Amino acid sequence: MDFSLSPELLELQQRTRAFIRDKIIPLEGDGRQTHHGPTEEFRRELVALAAAEGLVAPHVGAEYGGMGLSHVGKAVVFEESGYSLLGPVAMHIFAPDEGNMHLLEAVASTEQKDRWLRPLASGATRSCFCMTEPAPGAGSDPAALKTTAVKDGNHYVINGDKWFITGAEGAAFAIIMAKDEDGHATMFLADMDTPGIEIVRQMDSLDQAFAGGHAVMRFNNVRVPASDILGEPGKGFRYAQVRLAPARLTHCMRWLGAAKRAHQIATDYALRREVFGSKLIGHEAVGFMLADNEMDIRMSRLSIMHTAWLLDQGERGGTESSMSKVFVSEAVWRVVDRCVQVLGGQGVTGETLVARIFNEVRGFRIYDGPSEVHRWSLAQRIARNGANW
């Protein structure tokens, strides 16, 4: 594996880095950030700034306005975007839209791409992915899906409850996972103003960076034309993996950027703060925490790049993306937790961005599969196949 970046990718990395630092970080104090994410007005302003730099949705194909970045290319650019919590929002590469764009590009029909993908890729609209359900429905186990889709002529009638649906408030359309009469999962596309789609309430959560927040939703006799099935009927679980394996990795990329920001803030503080007659960095306990941070950041990047490279070679990368997701989510948490400790009292206040990053990254160990579920899945593979190097 060659770790050198092409001149084009290096230029894009530097351009993204400059954009985040010069245009986005100065806006981090904007009051239009709510507990459920930036307002739609603010989001559109951020996207417009990225559009002026040619940096909106760089991962999608050129025919949809992007750059068609490889997975390795995404690893480089998405990490840079994550240096500000607003960066992925501005570049329109945050969840769930980034994963939904990938899925639509992979399996949607030409008509569906024109109707839903094009405006989504431009940043004009947002979307949501409706799979997670309250107990006893689908959570970490998608096979527990309870939402139903019953065929009625040329339509399907969808009924069920969903929750923790990221980005639902203000989304233009939804990708809905439901079981048909044969028990097979199918994905449906539906505009959010379709009769019967209801946002019951917003859920308060530790994180505040996701545009549209997280919602509880209800589908009450929602009629969707059969032509709006995404891909083929009965292949919903397969398509979920098409979406989730790369999406796990892009979460890693973005949150690694946030961990780097926290580490930079803590390091700068340790270099200037004097305590007990010397700079804080000179105290071994602090220096060791920062050294551990750099090791976690470096190893996380290596894990991401290796998995991205495998995906670029045409490998499915499911096992590797699970490993990366577990390792990076836990490494990012360790890094940010150490940064809080280095900053002392400031670390738990709004005096720096670190406390906010601390809240944001905690959910990363749960989203797209808790660490324990990924470990269980890996253990099952080992039980079947033995050690595999």
Image (cartoon, helix red, strand yellow):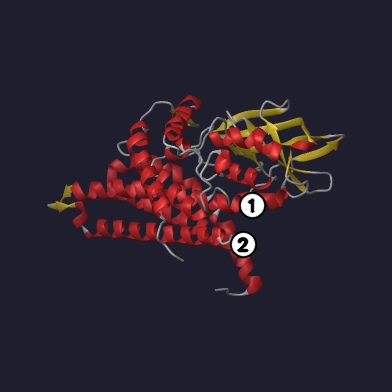
Local crowd size for mark 1, using a 10 Å CA cut-off: few (<14), some (14–19), many (≥20)? some
Number of numbered discs on residues? 2
Residue located at (64% from left, 53% from top): 241
> Which quarter of the figure is the C terminus placed in?
bottom right
Q: Is residue 352 left or right of residue 73?
A: left
Outermost residue toward the right? 153
Q: Is residue 6 left or right of residue 232?
A: left
Asked whether residue 283 is in view, the answer is yes
Front position among marks 1 and 2: 1
Q: Is residue 200 above or below residue 261?
A: above
Q: Is residue 329 above or below residue 202?
A: below
Most foreground residue, 158 or 52: 52
Q: Secondary structure at mark 1?
A: helix
Whether pointer 1 and pointer 2 mark residues with C-beta atoms closer than 8 Å, the reply is no
Amino acid found under the numbered disc labelled 2: Ser
Instruction: Give me the disc on residue 242.
Output: 1
Task: Return the x and y of residue 302 as percentages of the image width and height.
Answer: 43, 61
Label 1 to label 2, Cα distance in Å? 17 Å
Most foreground residue, 3 or 163: 3
Q: Which residue is mark 2?
A: 377
